[in-house]
Image: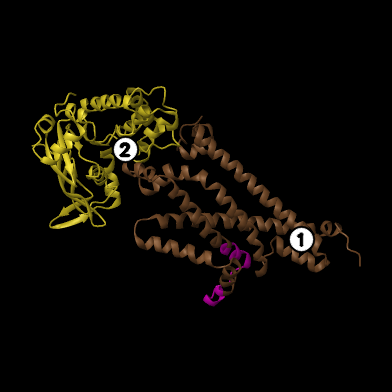
Chain colours: A yellow, B brown
Amino acid sequence: MSIPALKVSGLTKRFRGVTALDSVYLDVARGEVVTLIGPSGCGKSTLLRCLTWLEEPDDGFIEVGGRPFGRTIVGQVVHRQTRREIDALRPKIGLVFQNLNLWPHLSALENVARGPVVVLGRKRAAVEAQARALLARLGLERQMDKHPHELSGGQRQRVAIARTLAMEPELILFDEPTSALDPELVGEVLGLLREIAATGMTMLVVTHEIGFAGGVADRIAFMDQGRIVETGPARAVLDNPTDPRLRAFLGRVLPSSLGVTA
Amino acid sequence: MRMAFDPTILVQYWPLFLQGAWLTIQVSVQAFLLGYTLGIAVALLGLMPGRLPRLAATSYVEVLRAIPFIIILFVIYYGLPFSGLRLPAPLVGTVALGLFASAYYAEIVRAGILALPRGQFESARAIGMSPLQAMRHIVGPQVARAIVPPSTNMTLTMIKESAVLSSITVPELTYQGLVVQGNTFAPFEVFAAVTLIYWGITIAVAGAARRLERRLGVAQARGVSRNRLAASYLLLERERAR
């Protein structure tokens, strides 16, 4: 078996005694698209924040492409990685924030180009050419010199995705990519996610869009109370949920029927 | 005795006023540079994770803010010889003034950074920027404009506090005013002139601050590339000459 793009084992996070993540195990294979669903407050966002070490998990291990991230075991002893070691691996794990967090003082082009120049130490000319190509591919050739506040919601989303792609990550985490959008833009962004998935990118997508989960994802993981309760092929999980909590959840988000058309 | 405004005093002693004003400007600029550098350092220290750096930063600010400037000055000036150090008064005065201002600058910078959504810093960190890189490229440029007005206020206060250095014989503007007054017994003429000079200095500083604020605002609103100075700093494009 090949090395998974992401391997999470026993990840636990507590906030002042409240357990947000309760020993989460999750493997994501290279090129696989996994969606993470679950009621709000179940720990989905916390999981993504721990996977980028924005939040330091209290326990557990993360591997990215076989390399330990954040913590490593040498012999019998758990070592915390240094800030530098963590920063060095961070470009491999892209994160598209729920509210994007674009940098308002920089143009769309600069939002995309700044990371590779500063973090990866690439030549500006090459990075800019690459960033232009990337933005053009995402349909933003006319928006490159605009600032985030001059862009529409869908365009901002594209810039945020381009900023992440420019770092050439091995996997991308999406935190509810459609939650901040107008309803008519949801389809557009989901289409974009499909395109990215089609390029073979490994993706872990937190979403409320069960349609997307069923249509694009290879696998669905259902989280509740800080645990991954059920995981399996998208169709199977949606059509034949076994866990009662998942059934209740699907009953709420899909009130008419459990049949899903993507 | 007739009280009449006698401008000949000012004509006669203008070199002293000029020397005093020049030293006030020099001391202020140096204290500003020292104070702001320390202020930024203390602000960043206070925002570091962990209790110890934060405690160090808050203690620094709390202590310096709790003491009148003249006392800070006396403690340093009269305290240093106890440790075997005897430094010239203008140097001690400048350092004391810089320390005094740094506590307030630190609070201004800290508040400016905290006012920015945390996601700005996090999105920079998430792609692999170090905390300092995130400060320099993402947080700093956005905070810069917001902190210009409060920093200007503090700088004007500091320039005026520099008058206190006269009490440890630093020959700045107020000191020279006292000297001229001692020679001429014409306090009103002397301090009217001193007032005007302080006023001129502070007006110049306030005007420069307004221009800086506009510049930073323009850079933010219209795209940094329009402003070459800001652009060279913000975009790191030294190689891309235009």
Secondary structure type for disc 2: loop
Looking at the rendering, the stretch of residues picked out in magenta corresponds to B79-96
Residue B121, given in percent of the width and then of the height, sits at: 38, 45
Q: Magenta span has B128?
A: no
Residue with the most extreme front position: A256
Provide the residue designation for mark 1. Answer: B191
Number of on-image labels:
2
Where residue A244 sits, quadrant-wise, is top left
Residue A122, given in percent of the width and then of the height, sits at: 35, 36
Q: Identify which amino acid the numbered label 1 is placed on.
A: Phe
In the image: residue A77, left or right of residue A192:
left
| C-alpha distance separating marks 2 and 1 | 61 Å
The image shows residue A21, relative to residue A116, as above or below, that is: below
Secondary structure type for disc 1: helix
Most frequent secondary structure within the magenta stretch: helix
Residue A184, given in percent of the width and then of the height, sits at: 32, 24
In the image: residue B199, left or right of residue A11:
right
Foreground residue among A11 and A128: A11
Q: Chain of mark 2?
A: A
Q: Does the rendering let one see residue B111?
A: yes
Q: Which residue lies at the image location 53% right of the left edge and 40% below the top edge?
A: B216
Question: Which quadrant would the N terminus of chain B be assigned to in this image?
Answer: bottom right
Around disc 1, counting alpha carbons within 10 Å, would you say few (fewer than 14), some (14 to 19), or many (20 or more)? some
Where residue B73 sits, quadrant-wise, is bottom right
Q: Identify which amino acid the numbered label 2 is placed on.
A: Gln
Q: Which residue lies at the image location 57% right of the left edge and 39% below the top edge?
A: B214
Mark identifier at residue A98? 2
Q: Does the rendering let one see residue A200?
A: no
